[in-house]
């Protein structure tokens, strides 16, 4: 009689659970720092004498370098060792958090946020690729990605919540300093739980030209998008910046076609549905990250909520995302990623549409909570399924770059969404002020217009998701025509 292998999966072991917790903690650090500063901005401005124009670089500086260095971070993880790059990024993230928390000038804080973004760009792709290459057998990968997706979906809300609690409690500096003890634990955990890997390429073979081109192109693209609401979308500066970014990125693609060890192996786009999943993430994040931004402004500037009360308002959403993420990981094994993606994005869009109907004298229980809960369920379903689809059938030696593509899409989407919807909200508010409407009415009208556009973007992301592969998180398959890597060296 044949015997069956009764060995538990790695995720079923204590070490597996602790490893997954560690990897998700790293992701949580990166994701939450994109939103944790938002509630603290007024306190930062008062304490460090920021100008209104310069204050935007506290959140935008992080997004700029995070998105700009993401592809470089992902490929470095593949070529030079995932644990090595994640540890280096965590050290930089920790040091920049200390610098920001102790900052005595506005320039010092903004510089720390730039450095934080670089550290996060080194941390996140390598961490996700460690997850997808560590949890493989049985349903481990699907469950692990389900937890990861829940963390990604809930981190923005948790950031606003934690930012409010820290700002009203020990002060805004702890929005930065709170990262330091977590980073120390993370670094220790990486050495204890994650095996060191060998370099798969010599430094001499590294695609330095590709690294310079893609980083410069992404930095220029994100910078231009962030500045567009201030200078105007039709301004020569904006048009020139976008055109320059396109030219640099096209030069990067030409370089990758001819290189022996390309930074971005273009054959990765032959993986069915990967591109559609990344685009769906970009469009969805444009809508959902902007939702948090405008609802927070509405609660503080129109309803008069304190930072702590604003943060606490998102607590039910965190629970909703967690519940939906757990359900999603079960659904993926039965029906695949595509239907879960589409349903989640439509549900999130419906919740944001509900929120777009906010009145000037809104009440939390009737005007905010129902829409937030509907959006949270959709958000949990969407993030888990998109993350799974974007990493399915990716060979281990491409896991870092696949993770980087997904997360670069996320950061670019966040920057693009805020730029587009801020312009819509500002234009609507100015029109209402010109019609002599009271300022609370004008602000609410602008926020409502922006939230309506966010819901349309989420619906558009659902349409894009129809082109993604319907996978159940299958094991990775090597690309047939992928170039062989150099002989591993220590």
Image: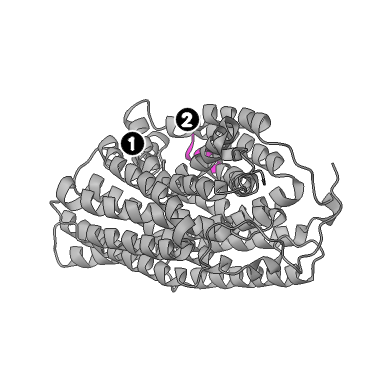
**25 shown above or below 227:** above
Circle 1: element type: helix
Residue at x 79%, y 46% (from the top left corner): 199
Q: Residue 178 carries which label?
A: 2
Is 249 on the left or on the right of 114, as rendered? right
Q: CA–CA distance between discs 1 and 2?
A: 13 Å
Percent from the top left, x then y, of residue 409? 53, 60
Which SS class for mark 2? Answer: loop
Name above or below for residue 408 compared with residue 325. Answer: below
Dividing the picture into quadrants, the one containing residue 273 is bottom right
Q: Give the range drawn in magenta.
A: 102-111
Residue 140 x %, y %: 56, 46
Residue at x 81% of width, y 57% of height: 485
Q: How crowded is mark 1: few (under 14 residues within 10 Å), some or many (20 or more)?
A: many
Residue ID at (55%, 58%): 406
The part of the image, by quadrant, that contains residue 481 is bottom right
Query: 233 or 69, which is in the foreground?
Result: 69
From the viewer's side, name the closer residue of 206 and 241: 206
Residue 460 is situated, as x and y percent measured from the top left of the image, at 39, 70
Q: Is residue 90 something one can see in this rendering?
A: yes
Residue 107 among those drawn in magenta: yes
Q: What is the magenta segment's predominant secondary structure?
A: helix
- Badge 2: residue crowd in 10 Å (few <14, some 14–19, many ≥20): some
Identify the residue at image location x=55%, y=64%: 221
**What is the total number of numbered labels drawn onto the structure image?**
2
Q: Quadrant of the C terminus?
A: top right
Residue 248 picture location, percent across and down: 65, 68
Q: Circle 1 sits on which residue?
A: 164
Residue 463 falls left or right of residue 133: left
Q: Residue furthest front?
A: 1
Residue 46 appears anywhere in the view: no
């Amino acid at each position: 009689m044949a015997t069956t292998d009764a060995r538990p999966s790695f995720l079923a072991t204590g070490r597996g659970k602790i490893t997954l917790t560690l990897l998700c903690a790293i992701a949580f650090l990166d994701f939450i720092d994109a939103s944790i500063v938002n509630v603290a901005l007024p306190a930062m401005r008062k304490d460090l004498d920021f100008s209104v124009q310069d204050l935007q670089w506290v959140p935008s500086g992080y997004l700029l370098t995070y998105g700009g260095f993401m592809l470089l971070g992902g490929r470095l993880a593949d070529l030079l060792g995932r644990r090595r790059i994640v540890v280096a990024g965590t050290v930089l993230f920790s040091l920049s958090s200390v610098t920001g928390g102790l900052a005595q000038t506005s320039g010092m804080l903004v510089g720390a946020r730039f450095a934080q973004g670089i550290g996060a760009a080194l941390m996140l792709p390598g961490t996700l690729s460690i997850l997808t290459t560590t949890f493989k057998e049985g349903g481990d990968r699907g469950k692990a990605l389900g937890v990861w997706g829940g963390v990604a979906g809930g981190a923005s809300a948790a950031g606003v919540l934690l930012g409010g609690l820290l700002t009203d409690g020990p002060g805004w500096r702890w929005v930065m300093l709170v990262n330091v003890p977590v980073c120390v634990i993370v670094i220790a955990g990486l050495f204890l739980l994650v095996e060191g890997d060998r370099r798969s390429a010599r430094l001499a073979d590294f695609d330095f030209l590709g690294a310079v081109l893609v980083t410069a192109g992404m930095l220029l693209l994100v910078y231009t998008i962030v500045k567009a609401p201030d200078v105007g979308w039709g301004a020569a500066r904006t048009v020139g910046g976008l055109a320059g970014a396109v030219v640099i990125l096209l030069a990067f693609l030409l370089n990758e076609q001819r290189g022996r060890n390309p930074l971005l192996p273009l054959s990765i786009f032959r993986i069915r549905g990967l591109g559609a999943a990344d685009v769906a993430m970009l469009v969805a994040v444009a809508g959902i990250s902007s939702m948090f931004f405008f609802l927070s402004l509405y609660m503080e500037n129109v309803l008069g909520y304190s930072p702590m009360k604003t943060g606490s308002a998102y607590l039910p959403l965190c629970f909703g995302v967690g519940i939906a993420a757990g359900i999603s990981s079960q659904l993926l094994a039965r029906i695949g990623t595509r239907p879960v993606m589409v349903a989640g994005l439509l549900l999130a869009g419906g919740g944001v549409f509900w929120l777009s109907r906010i009145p000037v004298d809104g009440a939390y229980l009737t005007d905010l909570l129902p829409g937030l809960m509907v959006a949270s369920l959709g958000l949990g379903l969407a993030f888990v399924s998109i993350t799974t689809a974007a990493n399915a059938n990716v060979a281990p030696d491409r896991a870092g770059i696949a993770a980087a593509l997904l997360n670069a899409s996320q950061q670019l989407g966040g920057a693009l969404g805020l730029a587009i919807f801020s312009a819509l909200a500002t234009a609507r508010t100015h029109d209402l002020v010109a019609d002599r409407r009271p300022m609370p009415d004008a602000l609410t009208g602008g926020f409502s217009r922006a939230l309506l556009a966010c819901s349309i973007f989420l619906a558009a992301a659902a349409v894009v998701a129809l082109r993604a592969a319907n996978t159940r998180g299958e094991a990775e398959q090597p690309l047939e025509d992928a170039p062989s890597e150099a002989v591993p060296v220590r």
